[in-house]
Image: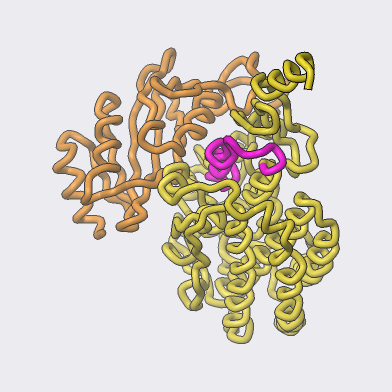
Chain colours: A orange, B yellow
Amino acid sequence: MEIDKLLELVKSYQPEAEIVSGKQFLTVTVDKKNLHQFAKQLKESDETRFDYLFCQSAVDYNDHFVVVCHIDSTKYRHQLVLKTKITDRENPEIDSLCDIWNAAEFHEREIFDLFGIKFTNHPDLRKIFLDNDWVGFPLRKDYVDPVNIVER
Amino acid sequence: MNMEEANIQSLIEEQEFTINMGPQHPSTHGVLRLILKLQGEMVREVKPQLGYIHRGIEKMCEKMTYQQIIHLTDRLDYFSAHILNEAVCLNVERALEIEVPDRVKYVRTILDELNRLASHQLWWCAYGMDLGALTTFFYGLRDREKILDIFEETCGARLLFSFNVPGGLMYDIHPNFQKRIKEFIKYFRKKLPEYDALLTGNPIMQERTIGIGYISKEDAINYGLTGPPGRASGFSCDVRAHQPYSAYPFVKFNEALFTEGDTFHRYKVRIAEMWESMSIIEQLVDNIPEGDYSVKMKPVIKLPEGEYYQRVEAARGEFGVYIVSDGNKTPFRMKFRSPNFCNLAPLHILSIDQKIADLVAISGSLDFVIPDMDR
């Protein structure tokens, strides 16, 4: 599907969402409380059919986190980037997308481990790489580790 | 059977017990630990435990320049090192809006396919060994050696190539490059039927793989199972076909697709891909255009502010590089979508209510490389 047509569709689903049409992907930033419902709509609607989550990650922008989902449709072969801002650094929480895309299960465990973002309704939210007694979240920008990270 | 024996028998059948498979288990091909719940010989629960070689590569990338990062991607999936190098280079070139010469595209694609061939050969010989057929190991390594020799002559390395640099290749190809590849293809076209004769038709191999470890197309898509395992279930996920990069738009090839979704067809996809790889190389090797092997680049690469994503098809599935740049010479955030990590997620679907011996066949057919999983 053309990127303009997709833009119109997304606009009709989520009028308040912030939509940026980039060179490569259409980027949609939605509010935290709308995320789950919007993601479900994107997957189940016949016009979009985003059934394949190919990448999920998080970015730490010092004052807030952004959870980024790259999704693809195996029927129409169009892609979309779904973003959500989390402003609470002390106790970041967001809805899990596991029940929509099962692929999110491992990605979310990784984000939980390395960023400390909690996913509500995740079936099995445990640390995936680090030890259970590991202190801190390494991929956060304010993480300090005087032993393993050498400042140059 | 007396009373006591019957009691023991029912105890074995009913009682669930938990065991560790790995981290030092030969069939996991690295340090992967699976926590299994067994009932007799049947697997009732699988929980993978990762992180034994987590090196924090994504964190390390935040302190490194793009030229240095290429050397880190080698250390992810070291059996498709060239393809992963290319992913970073393509992403940097996309960000800087550089169009590389056709010569670079052709050579990159040829080396991609050689790398894929070498990876599938190694998988084939190790998979035979997982199933108890030792001879396959000698056949596979014998042929893989010839590819590694070509790589050694081209870039000096046999496993971790780092031959791609942003803007092109590190140096021009060796004068013997085309001749040796043509010799190899001629040789391997004769040898690949031997693989089929040795293992594919073997009744023991077929008994152990046909109908074992089934996953449906819907589940494969939902779990993001890509690469040969995904295509065995009918999920058309070949990035080379759907979002072609480098010289893939110039060649004709068939995406190997099966719908059966069992272990045997994951095997068949890889054999079919080896034939396709050879045909891709043959289409390109005679037509390498003359020209520069690299674009002149500045010594310090600074990407414009923004986000960039590049997908490539590595030997084990879709590999993605996600760069968030803030305009500095190091990335603000770098994320690698590694195929093995995502292919591990549906392991419980494949292996629950199968025998523990079949779990070895199933995890072998997913072709795990643990450093890629743990990053």
Residue range (magenta): B336-358
Q: Quadrant of the C terminus of chain B?
A: top right
Residue B228: % across, % down: 56, 57
Question: Would residue B152 be seen by someone viewing this image from the given angle?
Answer: no
Say which residue appears at 29% left-offset and 30% top-offset. A35
Say which residue appears at 41% left-offset and 31% top-offset. A98
Answer with left or right where residue B65 lies relative to residue B155.
left
Is residue B349 one of those drawn in magenta?
yes
Answer with left or right where residue B152 lies relative to residue B107.
right
Q: Quadrant of the N terminus of chain B?
A: top right
Say which residue appears at 45% left-offset and 22% top-offset. A117
Quadrant position of residue A32: top left
Q: Nearer the viewer, residue B212 or B31?
A: B212
Residue A122: % across, % down: 43, 24
Residue B65: % across, % down: 60, 46
Residue B262: % across, % down: 56, 53
Question: Which secondary structure is most common in the magenta stretch?
Answer: helix
Quadrant position of residue B42: top right
